[in-house]
Image (cartoon, grey):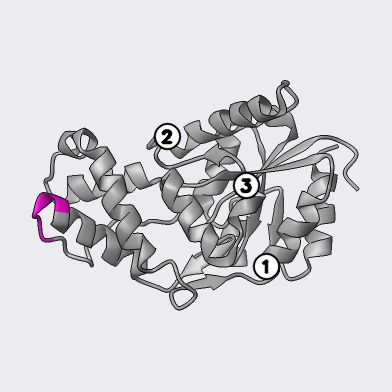
Amino acid sequence: MCQKKILILFDIDGTLIKFKSGTAGKIFSDIMEEIFQVKIDKNNLPDFAGQTDLKILKEICEINNISFTSVLANINEVWNKMLLLFGKYCTTDYILLLDGVPELLNTLSKEKNITLGLLTGNFQENAYQKLRTYNLHNFFSFGAFGSDDEDRSKLPPLAIERANKLNKQDVFSNENTIIIGDAPRDISCARANNIKVASVATGNFSFIELEKYKPDLLFDNFKNYISVSRSLCQLIQ
């Protein structure tokens, strides 16, 4: 049992669930083509791992000589079209539930001193749409999202602020927060905010690759969810 109040912020893609390879790139390409009538080479897309949706859109614009200002001017239309297009793929046929995830979330949610939130590059509506594929959405009543800012490192303070607002008191800070993700950008985001970070090798990066970035905790997966939950509690002393 955790002795101190802890805020745990989960990434989604590659951490809780995982799209089949190439799906997200196809969706982004289709969106840009539909909205801006620009043919996007699916092989000429930025690396999505750990990126915010705003940052991905910006890089796609830079690569393909599209005005990012015009994207921002139509951002609600972009989010709405993305939500519809992603919705077609938010099924168990296209999304995998990663091992141990429901058990881990259920275990952590029962800890009275733990609050769960999201820290994800997905824009907010799509984050919850993806999670609903496996009924994981109810574990997370708040978070910080890829629609809040293109810079992922600016998301943790937003998530902490929202957690405190939910609790109606300032109980969380960078000192008792943990970020969990599957990519080096999750680690750098945590380090930029002086926050503890746990990495899991279920995304596009192997255990050995993630180890080089020296996260505070590193797991192969969440199969041994009891051990994972204990390690997370022990990380904040």
Distance between the alpha carbons at the discs numbered 2 and 1:
29 Å
Q: CA distance from mark 3 to mark 1?
A: 20 Å
Q: Is mark 3 in CB contact (under 8 Å) with mark 1?
A: no
- Circle 2 Cα neighbour tier, 10 Å, few/some/many (<14 / 14–19 / ≥20): some
Are there few (<14), some (14-19), or many (20+) residues within 10 Å of tag 1? many
Q: Which residue is mark 3?
A: 140
Task: Classify 113 as above or below 95.
Answer: above
Instruction: Judge left or right: residue 188 versus residue 27.
Output: right
Q: Earlier in the sequence, mark 3 or mark 2?
A: 3
Q: Residue at x 17, y 64 (%)?
A: 41
Which label is found at residue 148?
2
- Position of 134 with respect to 139 (left or right) is left
**The magenta segment:** 35-39
Residue ranking furthest to the bottom: 93
Q: Examine the rendering and report whether any part of residue 101 can be seen.
A: yes
Apparent side of residue 215 relative to residue 73 in the rendered image (left or right): right
